[in-house]
Image: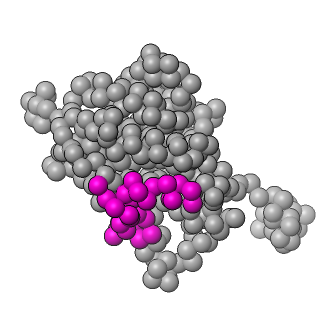
Amino acid sequence: MAANFPTSRLRRLRQHPKIRDLVREHDVHVNDLIAPLFVKQGLTGKKEISSMPGQYQLGLDALAAEIKTIVALKIPAIILFAIPEHKDATGSDAFAEDGIALQAIRLIRKTAPELLIISDICCCEYTDHGHCGVMDEHTGCMDLNNDATLPLLQKQVVAHAKAGSDVMAPSGNIDGMVQAIRSALDDNDFKHIPILSYTAKYASSFYGPFRDAAESAASFGDRRSHQLDVANANEALREAEQDVDEGADMLMVKPAMPYLDVMLRLKQTHPALPLCAYQVSGEYAMLKAASQQGWLDEQACVLESLVSMKRAGANMIITYYAKQVATWLG
Ligand code: PBG
């Protein structure tokens, strides 16, 4: 029994629902949400992703209708993943004028001038080997060539900004990527475009369904030479320091629920920087599958998962549940 009981009774503030509303510390709002979109070249209509029920790859012909739905739900932003027909060693379709990424950005911009478009900046959806940059034997064995990848990311951001994208989100965990894209944007009159860096992006197994969705599974090897070791937290703080020094405007932690400790620590060490949580494909798949089985109350559990991220310090959340959440909150 607490020493100050019975003077202090914490249940006083829990008894009345209106008091509970008044003292609530965190809330999930539709303004916090970012909806991921997969746009696939050559696809007509849309195709459900089998490991992510309710999520689709969209053909260009189905994109405008989806964008209108998202705008009608008052979701402020989308993050775009493009899946090209043509893949090569350097992922050149990411910045090709007639490539699927630029076509999709232009179409979204035209359909919804006010919707925020975030570009995921990486090579893995566009390379024939599925890795996040240039692969060669510069270290004696096949590995991702960090510095040779930077110019490709620079080309991507300039092309995406020209096409109408509003925010650049580099996701490859390549050293120096934030500085490289900041200078490319600045040199091309895009000084106003912010960078949302995938600062603490872990080499997680929770990306499995995404790699089906984006058709970006590596044909050999893995991403552990550049994504963070899942057992490390201090490393994320070093990543954050570097990203801030290089000019990142916003930081991200990914995945979200298994890394709430990292989120909290980044918020504590960088309180002034907006923080984004990415509830990834595997997190969606778990919640969706259990809900479909009738084992979880979907709405309650999804909202609980999102408010846990707000509690840990997230200001915004990328989630495949964005449309459903907007409907529930609406
Ligand atoms: C890389 C990227 C990935 C995700 C977002 N951006 C995949 C990866 O690193 O392999 C995963 C997101 C998810 O699982 O929902 N372009």
Residue drawn at x 21%, y 44% as measured from the top left:
87
> Eyeballing the image, is 189 above or below 203?
above
Q: Residue furthest left?
A: 140
Q: Residue furthest bottom?
A: 294
The magenta stretch spans residue 16: no
In this rendering, position of residue 222 left or right of residue 181: left
Q: Residue furthest top?
A: 187
Q: Quadrant of residue 58?
A: bottom left
> Eyeballing the image, is 150 above or below 83?
above
How many marks can you see?
Answer: 0
- Is residue 220 visible from the viewing direction of this image? yes
Q: Quadrant of the N terminus?
A: bottom right
Residue drawn at x 53%, y 78% as measured from the top left:
296
- Is residue 208 visible from the viewing direction of this image? no
Q: Nearer the viewer, residue 76 or 288?
A: 76
Q: Point out residue 320 in the picture as x, y percentages from the top left corner.
A: 49, 60
Q: Point out residue 221 in the picture as x, y percentages from the top left corner.
A: 17, 47
> Eyeballing the image, is 290 above or below 219?
below
Question: Bounds of the magenta span?
Answer: 42-69
